Image (cartoon, rainbow, N blue to C red):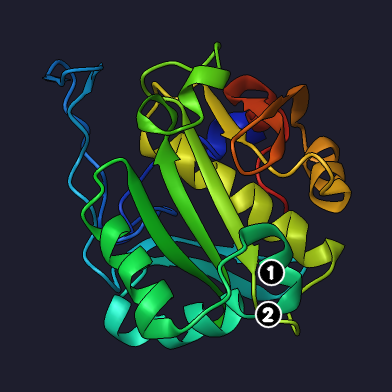
Amino acid sequence: MFCSRSVFFQVSLPPSGTYKGWLGTHVIESPYNDIHLSEHSQYPLRPSKPLGGTLVYSRYIPSLDKTFTMRALNIESDADAFAEWMNNDRVAKFWNMKGDKDKVHVPYLNALDVDKHVVNVIGSLDDEQFLYTELYYVAEDHLAPFADSAGLYDRGFHLLVGNERLRGPHIVRAWLTSIVHCLFLHDRRTRYVFLEPRADNEKLIGYLLLHGFTKLKEFDFPHKRAALMRIERETFFKVGPAM
């Protein structure tokens, strides 16, 4: 039996059983018709968030001979690493979150913990933590007014690499395409994945362009000049995640 690369990487299976998939133990089952109404918006009822520590995604990367995993952030066990990374000068240049763990970082993580439109996760290579990312729904995010093409099920993510040992283009291609892969697998109705890096973050924008993203425009947030980057499902799965 022949299975194209494009089809193979779109198969979404649970992580147990005879055939194991890439999604973690918290397999998202999205409601299909329920709409949440608020004073200012209308958007679908989102699936429940994974508990802290729950595996979200896992994939073996042959070129690295390592397994990339993402698990839901656990505030109690991950706050120290989060604070250390945010106080890194390289990270702080783009996140602007230097400060005391208990006064700055834990309150920030607590706020995200009750925010239904975002899931924050820790990325690891063979159990060595190195990456933090926030996976969000664009429709409920501050990006929504600037992303005209975004639908109700389209996703975006913020990220940082905090572990200096695990940097470089060969590692970027693994985690970048894996995060996008994870988001497209979560819901087949997700057509686009967006990022909005700082417009002067030439290195990240270059990586995004190299791996299939398109730069749609530049625009102004209150806190930064941003570049709107987008990748389409069909474009991504022509090649799939990096091997």
For residue 64, above or below residue 27: below
For residue 76, above or below residue 71: below
Bin the neighbour count of mark 2 within 10 Å (Cα to Cα): few under 14, some 14-19, many 20 and up: some
Q: Which mark is residue 91?
A: 1
The mark total stands at 2
The quarter in which the C terminus is drawn is bottom right
For residue 133, above or below residue 184: below
**Residue 76 seen from this side:** yes
Residue 174 placement: quadrant: bottom right
Q: Are marks 1 and 2 in contact (CB under 8 Å)?
A: yes
Q: Which x, y percent locates residue 153?
A: 38, 24
Query: Label 1 amino acid?
Result: Val
> Front-most of 160 and 33?
160
**Residue 17 seen from this side:** no
Query: Label 2 amino acid?
Result: Asn
Kindly identify the residue that appears in the image at 45 percent across and 26 percent down: 154
Residue 225 placement: quadrant: top right
Left or right of 24 on screen, residue 38? left
Bin the neighbour count of mark 1 within 10 Å (Cα to Cα): few under 14, some 14-19, many 20 and up: some
Kindly identify the residue that appears in the image at 22 percent across and 34 percent down: 46
Kindly identify the residue that appears in the image at 67 percent across and 29 percent down: 220
Spatial CA span between label 1 and label 2 = 5 Å
Q: Which x, y percent locates residue 186?
A: 37, 39
Residue carrying label 2: 88
